[in-house]
Image (spheres, helix red, strand yellow):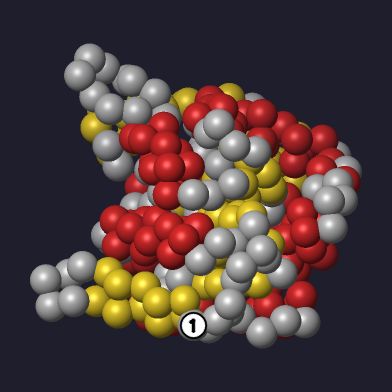
Amino acid sequence: MKVFGGTSNPELTKAVCEYLRITPGKMLSKTFSDGETQIEIHENTRGMDVFVLQSTCPPVNDNLMQLLIITDALKRASAKRITAVIPYYGYGRQDRKVKPRVPITAKLVADLITVAGADRVVSMDLHAGQIQGYFDIPVDNIFAAPLLLKYIRTHFEDNLVIVSPDAGGTERARAFAKRLEASLAIIDKRRDAPNVSEVMNIIGEVDGKTAIILDDMVDTAGTLTEGARALKKRNAARIFACCTHPVLSGAAIQRIQDSPIDHLVVTNTIPLSESAKKCPKITVLSVDQLLGETIKRIYNSDSVSTLFV
């Protein structure tokens, strides 16, 4: 087994390899003056089971292209099986046609990864479950739920309400509420344009409770902070938030700082920017053991789903 990491998240690659007790694969990534990416694999991979760890996080297009080129290089180096481990699947929000003459980019990216030579894909908390069906190869969609549940149980007492930031996240929030024996609330919102949302109402009882907003990602933090303000107006005692993917683009950090959110818990599927690292409201949980165990089980042909029972 070999694990190669792209440049999107080298610290996570190192941590995963430490868990697996192996050395990261030797590889050189260079960029030509015009922006082209060049990859050189510096060790033998012929007949081996190879895993490529690369999040398609900002800069999204550069990291996606690097993933494709690494995969192609390994295919041409005669690797027996190539598994693309993509902790954060970029373009996952463009998973359907919301109006005429728009692309389904999540499907396009799936095709690109497959054509590049990947035999299998591992990702975490896909924005929409149906993205697994966009691939003609096996996909393991693993969840950060065990990490987040453990954190919530350790740091919070009773009187919790798990809050879904929109109707689409209700299933995820309901699953958390059931395991934590907490109540459930849903934020009813309308989105008029990308990254712009308006909170309309809160369905459920939050008065006097500790509210935990649960989402798969936080991008500009507009939805998150508006939801937090709506919860505050409904007299929630304390407000926290949990997400898997901390995209945190634009004015996200400042919005979180200025919001009534006491704390935001994220994972390291995406490395934090310097400004995010300095934000006292953000705590990072590492997914290295979860990814490492998934890789080990795939290599040994063991069950992955039993990780989440």
State the image coordinates of residue 240 (x, y, percent, origin top left).
Answer: 60, 56
Residue 220 against residue 18 in the figure, above or below: above
Q: Amino acid at mark 1?
A: His
Give the quarter of the image for residue 189.
top left
Q: Quadrant of the C terminus?
A: top right
Depth check: 114 or 13 in front?
114
Residue visible at 36% across and 35% down in the picture: 108
State whether residue 229 appears in this view. Answer: no
Element marked by disc 1 = loop
Left or right: residue 22 compared with residue 170: right
Left or right: residue 215 compared with residue 298: left
Q: Quadrant of the N terminus?
A: bottom right
Residue visible at 43% across and 42% down in the picture: 115
Residue 132 against residue 37 in the figure, above or below: above
Residue found at the very far top of the displayed protein: 100
Left or right: residue 32 compared with residue 123: left
Mark 1 closeness class: few <14, some 14–19, many ≥20 residues within 10 Å? few
Left or right: residue 10 compared with residue 296: left
Numbered circles on residues, count: 1
State the image coordinates of residue 141 (x, y, percent, origin top left).
Answer: 65, 43
Residue 160 against residue 136 in the figure, above or below: below
Give the quarter of the image for residue 43.
bottom right
Residue visible at 48% across and 42% down in the picture: 114
Residue visible at 60% across and 71% down in the picture: 45
State the image coordinates of residue 239 (x, y, percent, origin top left).
Answer: 58, 53
Depth check: 296 or 117 in front?
117
The residue indicated by pointer 1 is 42
Depth check: 199 or 128 in front?
128
